[in-house]
Image: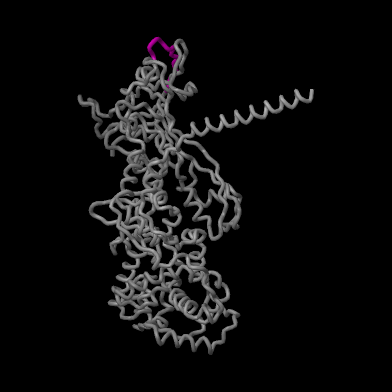
């Protein structure tokens, strides 16, 4: 018995080893090499330069952080220089240090009690803010100084960008001033800053700094005093000239200060106080945070083809956040290419080396990637519909992030973030998970038809212009659009859009659907029994309706229909324009004359009526008939001519 058990165990052992060996051989023989993507194959062929990247990821959030900007603006507007501040800095020592600043500055830096209070306020209440600002300044100040020296403008003007934007190239004031130097749209255009759908050079540190220097030179030619140049930068040269006249002709800033706008009265003192804190930060124990990135470790390169930040990120192994930080002038994470205008990207030095060494391969990949994207319909393509899917995401707040930066990242508004997360203020704690709801467009392709009888006819695929002629119903809100631009596009008013969509104000969400036509025709419902050879395309064509409408009315999941099934069809009745002519004998031609009126029918709207009458808008109908809102009732008589 023992012998038999021993023999059986031995046989099983060898059998197991044999099968294990056999299995190993099979798995080795069946091993398949993984496919390498085009992106990976290109990156493997890159000539590489091993230089450590100098950018710290966690500091990228500084770019979109508006806290410092808001604090700086609030100080200028609200801090009262007459209020004494308790801080350990003797008046005599401050006077001594201000004299040192004055001796090496083109500005008139003189002691006064109000300036002392502002300096002490900054030292007492804004210490951490200045530690962050000083870290940012290590990147921006060398750029500023180069341009200031070129235009022979005092180098201390670099501190003005701290006061203006808290060194945030994406800072936007309530009035719309944008960028490091806070240019308004008109002034930016005046100084040749390009502002388009894709770019805003007010956020380009090089070009905006050039424009600021040119402005300073022009203002100095008018006033001949750098203090007054600063005042004019904030209030405009007109207000400075008025203050000079009202003061009796005085031309010292401190003498005309009471006659300047309130904000400008705190502007120059804030500038001098900022200069003091930067110049004497060591004496007050202020230690700059780690530098975001050193200016001398980055460089620019001119691009010779359009590209996205995502493509650059994939090719150069650099995060999109870094690209945004270094290239804030590109509003849509996209670098355009134009024959008549040069565009540049700023990269860390090591990435510049990789880019220049592999430029042709990079352009080949970007072209390949663009060509992969969906093309317009051709005669042999199937019909594809588009739907909206609501998705809930969660974002964990990182150090330095603000609601403004997070809302911009996800294409939502600050008020929506606060509503979804029950926040009472704009401040949010680091580490908190924020709920974010977005509407995303998804393409829905039809299932393959079983035979030709249910294939979709290409003849029924309507172009965008044809669909709009039928009756445009909804508009998908795109980035950069507002109620005014959408109203202009569809020849309606903002009030119409607000009424049709129950909007309380003019705020609209990216990706939301807006009703842009209240053109609801009279309808009748018919039941159609599917015949042999029918498909959605032929049925839709027969009734003059859309394929997707039939799917919606009948809750169809795809484009297939069964023989003998009954479909619900909502048929719009043809609308005839009915006009009563007050003249005794109507003209033989069909056009309306000046006496024509239109009788409102059921389902009519001002928009649908305006569409029937060439050259007439909704605003015209409201004006001619004394209508303030958009409500009209069947049987009303409307003037259809001015």
Classify 124 as above or below 450.
Answer: below
Q: Position of residue 291 (x, y in %)?
A: 48, 68
Image label count: 0
Quadrant of the rendered structure where residue 455 is? top left
Q: Quadrant of residue 201?
A: bottom left
The answer to whether any part of residue 171 appears in the image is no
User: Of residues 524 and 357, which is closer to you in this image?
Assistant: 357
Please name the residue shown 32% across and 62% down the image: 188
The quadrant the N terminus occupies is top right
Looking at the image, which is closer to me, 577 or 417? 417
Q: Residue 578, position in %: x, y? A: 32, 25
Towards the viewer: 371 or 209: 371
Which residue is the extreme one toward the front? Answer: 3
Vertical placement of residue 27 versus 93, above or below: above
Seen from this angle, which residue lies furthest left? 588
Above/below status of 642 relative to 231: above
Between 332 and 22, the residue placed more toward the observer is 22
Task: Pick the quarter of the image with the C terminus.
Answer: top left
Q: Is residue 5 left or right of residue 550?
A: right
Vertically, is 511 above or below 227? above
Magenta segment includes 533: yes
Name the side, left or right, on which 67 lies relative to 10. left
Instruction: Locate residue 591, reporting x and y percent.
Output: 23, 29
Residue occupying the point 58% across, 75% down: 124
Q: Is residue 275 magenta?
A: no
Residue name at image x 28 percent, y 29 percent: 582
Q: Which colour scheme is used?
A: one colour
Give the extent of the magenta segment: 523-534
Q: Position of residue 539 (x, y in %)?
A: 38, 17
């Amino acid at each position: 018995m023992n012998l038999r058990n021993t023999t059986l165990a031995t046989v099983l052992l060898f059998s197991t080893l044999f099968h294990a060996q056999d299995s190993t051989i099979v798995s080795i023989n069946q091993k398949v090499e993984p496919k390498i993507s085009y992106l990976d194959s290109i990156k493997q062929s890159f000539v590489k330069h091993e230089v450590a990247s100098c950018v710290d990821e966690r500091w990228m959030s500084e770019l979109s952080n508006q806290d410092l900007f808001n604090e700086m603006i609030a100080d200028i507007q609200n801090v009262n220089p007459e209020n004494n501040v308790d801080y350990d800095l003797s008046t005599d020592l401050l006077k001594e240090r201000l004299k040192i600043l004055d001796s090496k500055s083109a500005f008139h830096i003189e002691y006064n009690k109000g300036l002392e209070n502002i300096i002490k306020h900054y030292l007492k209440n804004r210490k951490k803010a200045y530690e962050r600002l000083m870290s940012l300044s290590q990147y921006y100040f060398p750029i500023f100084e180069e341009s200031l020296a070129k235009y022979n403008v005092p180098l201390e003007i670099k501190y003005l960008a701290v006061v203006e934007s808290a060194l945030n190239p994406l800072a936007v004031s309530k009035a719309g001033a944008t960028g490091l130097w806070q240019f308004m749209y008109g002034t930016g255009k005046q100084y040749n800053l390009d502002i388009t759908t894709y770019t805003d050079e007010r956020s380009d540190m090089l070009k905006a700094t050039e424009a600021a220097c040119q402005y300073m030179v022009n203002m100095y030619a008018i006033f001949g005093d750098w203090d007054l140049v600063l005042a004019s930068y904030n209030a405009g040269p007109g207000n400075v000239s008025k203050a000079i006249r009202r003061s009796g002709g005085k031309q010292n800033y401190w003498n005309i200060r009471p006659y300047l706008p309130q904000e400008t009265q705190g502007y120059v003192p804030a500038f001098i106080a900022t200069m003091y804190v930067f110049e004497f930060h060591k004496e007050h124990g202020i230690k700059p945070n780690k530098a975001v990135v050193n200016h001398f470790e980055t460089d620019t390169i001119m691009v010779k083809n359009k590209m996205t930040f995502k493509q650059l990120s994939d090719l150069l192994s650099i995060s999109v956040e870094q690209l945004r930080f270094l290239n804030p002038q590109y509003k849509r994470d996209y670098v355009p290419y134009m024959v008549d205008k040069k565009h540049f990207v700023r990269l860390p030095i090591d990435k510049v080396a990789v880019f220049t060494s592999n430029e042709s391969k990079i352009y080949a990949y970007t072209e390949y990637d663009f060509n992969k994207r969906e093309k317009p319909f051709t005669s042999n393509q199937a019909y594809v519909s588009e739907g909206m899917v609501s998705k809930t995401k969660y974002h964990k707040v990182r150090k330095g992030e603000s609601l403004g930066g997070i809302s911009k990242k996800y294409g939502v508004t600050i008020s929506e973030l606060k509503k979804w997360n029950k926040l009472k203020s704009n401040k949010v704690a680091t580490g908190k998970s924020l709920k974010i709801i977005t509407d995303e467009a998804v393409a829905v392709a039809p299932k393959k038809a079983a035979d030709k009888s249910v294939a979709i006819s290409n003849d029924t695929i309507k172009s965008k212009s044809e669909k709009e002629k039928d009756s445009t119903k909804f508009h998908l809100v795109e980035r950069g659009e507002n109620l005014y631009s959408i109203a202009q596009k569809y020849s309606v008013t903002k009030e119409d859009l607000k009424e049709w969509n129950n909007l309380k104000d003019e705020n609209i969400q990216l990706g939301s659907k807006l009703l842009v036509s209240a053109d609801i025709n009279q309808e009748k419902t018919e039941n159609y029994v599917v015949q042999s050879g029918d498909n959605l395309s032929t049925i839709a064509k027969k009734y003059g309706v859309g394929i997707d409408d039939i799917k919606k009315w009948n809750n169809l999941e795809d484009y297939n229909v069964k023989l003998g099934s009954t479909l619900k069809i909502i048929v719009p009745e043809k609308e005839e324009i009915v006009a009563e002519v007050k003249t005794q004998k109507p003209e033989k031609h069909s056009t309306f004359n000046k006496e024509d009126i239109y009788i409102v029918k059921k389902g009519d709207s001002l928009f649908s009526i305006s569409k029937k009458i060439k050259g007439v808008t909704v605003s015209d109908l409201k004006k001619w008939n004394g209508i303030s809102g958009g409500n009209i009732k069947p049987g009303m008589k409307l003037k259809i001519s001015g």
